[in-house]
Image: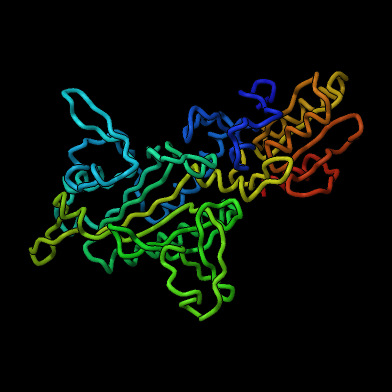
Amino acid sequence: MQYSKLFPKTLRQAPSRAESTNHQFLVRGGFIHQEMAGVYTYLPLGWKVLNKISDIIREEMNAIDGQELLMSALHPGGNWKKTGRFYSFDVLFKLKGVGDSDIVLGPTHEEIIYPLVAEFVWSYKDLPLYLYQIQMKFRNEARAKAGLLRGREFLMKDLYSFHTSDNDRDEYYKKVREAYLKIFKRINLPVVKTKASGGSFSDLSEEFQVLTPSGEDVVFVCENCQTAINREVVEEKVCSECGGQLKEEKSIEVGNIFPLKPSFAQTFGLSFTDADGEKRIVSAGCYGLGVSRTMGAVVEVFSDAKGIIWPEAVAPFQVHLVGLDLEQKSIANEVEKTYKLLLAEGVEVLFDDRVDVSAGEKFADADLIGIPYRVVISKKSGEKLEIKKRSEKETRFLTLDELIKIVLT
């Protein structure tokens, strides 16, 4: 991609309403555009990052036999009235449809997935079943803030598993837990498994929290064994696992998993006939992961005063190619040649091809956007390429083959 054609360009200043780090850098870097409080348009760079995160999630969900679908964002209000959440879910967006019908903008999808599965699951032979989606959710948050960390419209992955028994569900629950740890490891986002209350629909849950001073959640982490507990379930200031002292930390929740109580299955008649011909209620689990929130959390953790430092797995491009002295034809030709060779090798490249921009401005944009490798070609670089990794201070001079080997391994 040539930077001269990229929409939009970077901003020197963040909007006055942008207070959090992720909000400031994602807006300034041209990743997102705020439409109203808690609602964003994902611009080309931001959409690339979201797709990188989503692809990692898909691979790990598919590896545990998840089947992807896309459920409706508009929900019949009657389903929400059946569960009682039409009146009790305090951040619900409610609309009126044709004939004064009640419609809900989906904040979560139990009211859709349960009646859907109930239409097709009849026998124990139809189970287990694992269905997931990656979709926008809508919640009428009273205090939407902190960029992508608390929004009214946000991208989320939700997986639902359906089983013949609680024991089978609990075994799958362990697989999902490990899959989540793999996802965050691949993204390079450090998380701690955190015990939490399950609310009205589960006896317990586990959260995946990112420890950072900019977080809005509060967790207590054992200084000995790293066991973490959400502040809502802390009864004593000592670890229940090893007796160590618990330390209070701020954090960002990026995922949660929990077994579901049978109330949804009972409400929507989700049952099956077992091997003995007996009719039984399906056991289920729910597993959520905030895709856009993960993007925001990555920026909160991986950034400095100059801008974002994207982990390689989710960066919009692998290489930021900066051409200097492009008014000299020989240099311009060399940069263009290098750009085409990198693309031919399968390297994702953002090529700053601007002629009327200073070196300082190009370097500032590169630091702000945060692509892992900055590659400079100028009259000073000679036969080799000037390479600087965004996360490092040192500059190296390498051949093109050496660069490709580093980037693609």
In the image, is 354 to the left or to the right of 182? right
Q: Residue 331, how many percent across, how many down?
A: 85, 25
Q: Image height check: is 273 above or below 14?
A: below
Q: Residue 258, how many percent across, how many down?
A: 35, 60
Q: Nearer the viewer, residue 89 or 387?
A: 89
Q: Nearer the viewer, residue 324 or 264?
A: 264
Residue 334 falls in which quadrant of the image? top right
Q: Image height check: is 13 above or below 135?
A: above
In the image, is 207 to the left or to the right of 391? left
Regarding residue 54, the answer to whether it shows in the image is: no
Residue displayed at 90% across by 29% down = 379
Residue displayed at 32% across by 66% down = 170
How many circles with numbers are drawn on the protein?
A: 0
Q: Give the residue at the far left of this rendering.
A: 277
Residue displayed at 52% across by 66% down = 220
Residue 378 falls in which quadrant of the image? top right
Q: Image height check: is 131 above or below 250?
A: above
The quadrant the N terminus occupies is top right
Regarding residue 218, the answer to whether it shows in the image is: yes
The image's colour scheme reads rainbow
Q: Residue 109, how many percent across, how many down?
A: 30, 44
Q: Residue 340, how many percent across, how many down?
A: 71, 28
Residue displayed at 74% across by 27% down = 352
